[in-house]
């Protein structure tokens, strides 16, 4: 029996059945079962239907949607959403499949696949993308370093000739906090010197100000969103930069819509450390199960407050509330941050996996595209955006939408 109306299993392999959803309306029909599995398997908030639908509204208008539900003996063992679209740089064009949400916003993926079935699931899904959908390439990126998919070494062993593994690459790091049952245990895990430093800074801050540390959720979170945006943007404005909501095209309305959709279900929280009603630091997070997904943080840049270490203390205050709420993991997204490492975070290597059809033409086109993409990234982002534009004193502008979409 199918779990969704209007869909039929299209193939099977070793007792696995594959159902393909090709529209947002079909995906919404499956929302309860889809979301329940994503949470039960310990996957990411980025795979929930509300998130997928919102991303498609803002960034996926031109893509063909293919959402796969894989079952074994009528039990769901994987749900995987892909967007299929043509990409072109110069004379090189490929038809590629990527996870819904893989560009346009910050995310790190631990795809929702039942443990132990990774190879079987990807074999049947990748075969469908190459054989039924005629894709030239499939890109899985950025995969979390703790995802079991990122640990599979020899993909060609499981392909049966329907696809080949073309590229496996490290694409930076992402940061996690593993949280114990009590904040005292967390402080102890930092070591004596770091614990002592935090307690001193926290005590100094509390002596100077009437401190309040709180979480903001549900309907209040919807109203609070603009407060956070203004606070975060002001922080970056003082450094001559636009900040997240200015750098990333459509990110302001995209995040506003996410908060509006997900706050009523307690999937969104803002964290505020304030003194006498004035905010000192803030955090913006999504939640699923026992995991919090920190999106952004901000702090007051007043030089008189620098001695209190608001970056560290503010984040520690967030972690304190998360531990009280019973969270066991804080995923903080891509990038290396010294202050997070100083308060107990661990870094993991993100991976990019690229597969192609087993034809010389598909391999050649994909290799050429990857090379062109690397040159585009070097010239536009590393040379122009990061170096030349600031040196020339040009007014900051949002990131180039073409580069965001073209980058694999």
Image (cartoon, rainbow, N blue to C red):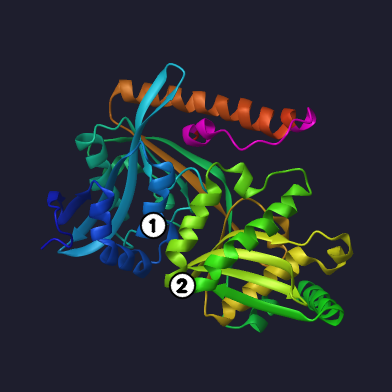
Q: Is residue 41 above or below residue 204?
A: above
Q: Nearer the viewer, residue 152 or 398?
A: 398
Which residue occupies 25% across, 35% down? 130
Q: Residue most toward the top?
A: 91
Residue 145 highlighted magenta (yes or no) = no
The quarter of the image holding the N terminus is bottom left
**Residue 107 seen by the camera:** no
- Look at the image and give the residue range highlighted in magenta: 390-406
- x, y percent for residue 246: 63, 45
The residue tagged 1 is 47
Which residue, as the protein is rendered here, is positioned at the far right?
A: 304
Residue at the outermost left position: 1
Look at mark 2 in the image and give the residue it sits on: 266
Q: Does the magenta-highlighted stretch encompass residue 399?
A: yes
Residue 29, image x, y percentages: 23, 60
Q: Position of residue 55 (x, y in %)?
A: 42, 49
- Left or right: 326, with 187 as reference point: left
Which numbered mark, 2 or 1, is in the foreground of this view?
Answer: 2
Foreground pick, 124 / 369: 369
Vertical placement of residue 275 versus 68, above or below: below
Res 291 label: none
Residue 39 relative to residue 285: left or right:
left
Q: Report the residue at 25% width, 53% height from top.
A: 25
Label 2 neighbourhood size at 10 Å, few (<14), some (14-19), many (20+)? some
Element carrying mark 1: helix
Q: What's the residue at 56%, 67% (across, down)? A: 223
State which quadrant residue 198 falls in. Answer: bottom right
Q: Secondary structure at mark 2?
A: loop
């Amino acid at each position: 029996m199918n779990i969704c109306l209007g869909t039929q299993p299209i193939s099977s392999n070793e007792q696995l059945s594959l159902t393909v959803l090709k529209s947002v309306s079909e995906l919404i029909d499956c929302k309860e079962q889809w979301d329940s599995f994503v949470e039960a398997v310990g996957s990411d908030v980025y795979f929930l239907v509300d998130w997928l639908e919102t991303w498609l509204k803002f960034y996926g208008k031109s893509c063909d949607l293919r959402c796969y539900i894989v079952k074994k003996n009528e039990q769901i063992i994987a749900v995987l959403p892909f967007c299929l679209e043509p990409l072109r740089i110069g004379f090189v064009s490929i038809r590629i499949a990527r996870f819904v949400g893989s560009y346009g916003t910050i995310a790190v993926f631990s795809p929702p696949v039942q443990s132990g079935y990774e190879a079987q699931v990807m074999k049947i899904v990748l075969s469908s993308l190459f054989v039924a959908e005629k894709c030239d390439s499939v890109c899985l990126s950025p995969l979390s370093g703790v995802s079991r998919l990122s640990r599979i070494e020899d993909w060609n062993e499981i392909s049966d000739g329907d696809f080949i593994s073309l590229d496996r690459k490290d694409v930076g790091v992402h940061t996690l906090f593993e949280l114990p049952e009590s904040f005292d245990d967390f402080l102890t895990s930092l070591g004596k010197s770091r614990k002592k430093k935090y307690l001193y800074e926290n005590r100094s801050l509390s002596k100077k100000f009437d401190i309040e540390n709180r979480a903001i959720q549900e309907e209040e979170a919807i109203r609070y969103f603009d407060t956070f945006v203004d606070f975060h943007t002001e922080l970056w404005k003082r450094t001559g930069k636009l900040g997240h909501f200015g750098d990333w095209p459509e990110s302001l309305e995209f995040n506003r819509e996410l908060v509006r959709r997900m706050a009523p279900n307690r999937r969104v929280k803002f964290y505020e450390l304030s003194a006498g009603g004035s905010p000192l630091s803030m955090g913006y997070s999504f939640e699923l199960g026992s995991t919090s997904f920190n999106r952004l943080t901000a702090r007051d840049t007043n030089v008189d407050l620098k001695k209190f270490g608001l970056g560290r203390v503010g984040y520690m205050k967030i972690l304190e509330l998360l531990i009280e709420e019973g969270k066991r993991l804080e995923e903080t997204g891509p990038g290396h941050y010294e202050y997070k490492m100083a308060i107990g975070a661990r870094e993991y290597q993100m991976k990019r996996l690229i597969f192609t059809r087993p034809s010389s033409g598909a391999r050649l086109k994909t290799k050429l595209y990857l090379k062109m993409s690397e040159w585009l990234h070097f010239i536009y982002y590393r040379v122009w955006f990061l170096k030349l534009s600031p040196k020339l004193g040009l007014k900051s502008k949002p990131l180039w939408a073409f580069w965001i979409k073209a980058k694999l």
